Image (spheres, helix red, strand yellow):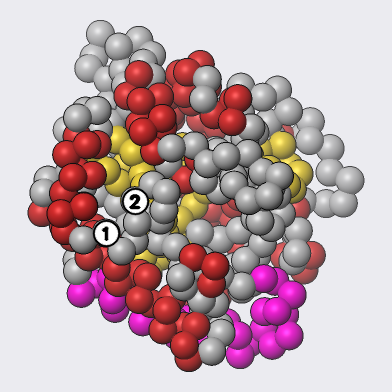
């Protein structure tokens, strides 16, 4: 039997332990140590996760961590046998940042958060634990506010992203913007392309493709004019979904520098203070609309079917699950099994 593919590396993500958690009436945040332990223990046919992608905010790892604190965290994660990949920078107003199309002060805080994340990323690279990964951002504004001046607001968001890209580049980092239906100027596949073209920093500011969130673009939530699937679409006709999803992937793939394996059921959901976005479901959910292995290839291969090898690691993304699901070891064994199938189908060996 041939040796299995060892690229892209397989990462879990820490932010599902935080997103949609906490606050009045919400489930408690899941500690980073719990997520590290679950990630390290997951195993399928002798294969394990290679690393974890981090949430750079309390209570996981503060964006304001000094070098000693970062070093201690690096040593701690390394003790689990894991590497570090992409970061989520807390660029939102409630987390110390501000709207990318807000006031001059809002936008300055946004860029400052990216700069801090880039500094941590640079240090982790120097310490040898972070061989790959970008810094995840979004527009930090709602669709309704953006829609008051679509052209002007997209230009303003692009200007902020451009400054964030420069801040990241100063530390050898790159930025990836995760388009979701809840973010103004990023709520459709066309708007994401328009925004990234306006930024005009290929290789430095790109797209983070979450399979599930990107699939919601085909249904036109918050962007009916960019809808690709017909009203009343019959989900049993897979060829129509495949064609629509390929349109989305073909448009955004040239800009995609970071990739999340995920599944959803074609509906929207929000919890805690997170606005409604595509509902992640478990990889084993029979209501999942994606063929995870097949549709991952739309992002990891070019339009001719050739491997791009652009993503040196891929991560699982499943936010807003109940804590009972998140803390069950079987959940992560199932996720790892699905990711191994993706790597077997679309990976390579070095």
Q: Is residue 140 above or below residue 264?
A: below
Q: Residue at x 67, y 83 (%)?
A: 150
Q: Which picture quadrant has residue 168?
A: bottom left
Q: Which mark is residue 65?
A: 1
**Local crowd size for mark 2, using a 10 Å CA cut-off: few (<14), some (14–19), many (≥20):** some
Q: Residue at x 38, y 14 (%)?
A: 44
| Residue 296 shows up from this direction | no
Q: Secondary structure at mark 1?
A: loop
In this view, the residue in front, 64 or 185, is 64
Quadrant holding the C terminus: top left
Span of residues in magenta:
142-170
Query: Principal SS element in the magenta part?
Result: helix
**Residue at mark 2:** 61
Q: Residue at x 34, y 38 (%)?
A: 52
Q: Is residue 35 above or below residue 106?
A: above
Q: Which picture quadrant has residue 233?
A: top right
In this view, the residue in front, 35 or 283, is 35
Q: Is residue 70 above or below residue 254?
A: above
Q: Is residue 292 above or below residue 177?
A: above
| Residue 336 shows up from this direction | yes
| Residue 147 painted magenta | yes
Q: Secondary structure at mark 2?
A: loop
Q: Position of residue 163 (x, y in %)?
A: 36, 82
In this view, the residue in front, 135 or 74, is 74
């Amino acid at each position: 039997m041939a040796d299995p593919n060892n690229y892209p590396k397989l990462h879990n993500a820490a932010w599902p332990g935080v997103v949609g958690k906490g606050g009045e009436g919400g489930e408690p945040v899941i500690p980073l140590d719990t997520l590290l332990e679950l990630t390290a223990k997951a195993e399928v046919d002798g294969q394990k996760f290679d690393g974890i992608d981090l949430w750079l905010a309390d209570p996981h790892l503060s964006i304001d961590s000094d070098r000693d604190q970062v070093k201690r965290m690096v040593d701690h994660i390394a003790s689990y046998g894991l590497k570090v990949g992409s970061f989520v920078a807390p660029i939102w107003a409630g987390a110390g940042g501000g709207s990318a199309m807000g006031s001059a002060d809002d936008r300055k805080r946004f860029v400052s958060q990216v700069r801090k994340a880039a500094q941590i990323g640079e240090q982790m690279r120097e310490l040898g634990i972070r061989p790959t990964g970008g810094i995840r951002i979004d527009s930090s504004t709602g669709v309704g506010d953006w829609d008051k001046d679509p052209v002007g607001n997209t230009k303003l968001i692009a200007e902020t992203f451009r400054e964030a890209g420069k801040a990241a580049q100063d530390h050898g980092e790159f930025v990836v913007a995760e388009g979701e239906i809840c973010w103004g100027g990023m709520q459709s596949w066309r708007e994401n392309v328009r925004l990234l073209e306006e930024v005009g920093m290929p290789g430095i500011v790109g797209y983070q493709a979450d399979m599930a969130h990107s699939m919601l673009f085909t249904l036109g939530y918050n962007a009916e004019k960019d809808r690709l699937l017909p009203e009343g679409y019959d989900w049993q006709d897979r060829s129509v979904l495949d064609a629509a999803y390929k349109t989305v992937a073909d448009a955004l793939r040239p800009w995609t520098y970071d990739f999340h394996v995920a599944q959803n059921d074609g509906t929207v959901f929000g919890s805690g203070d997170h606005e409604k976005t595509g509902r992640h479901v478990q990889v084993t959910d029979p209501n999942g609309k994606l063929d995870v292995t097949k549709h991952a290839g739309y992002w990891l291969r070019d339009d001719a079917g050739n491997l791009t090898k652009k993503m040196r690691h891929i991560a699982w993304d499943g936010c807003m699950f109940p804590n009972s699901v998140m803390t069950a070891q079987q959940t992560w064994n199932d996720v790892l099994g699905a990711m191994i199938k993706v790597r077997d189908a679309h990976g390579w060996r070095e």
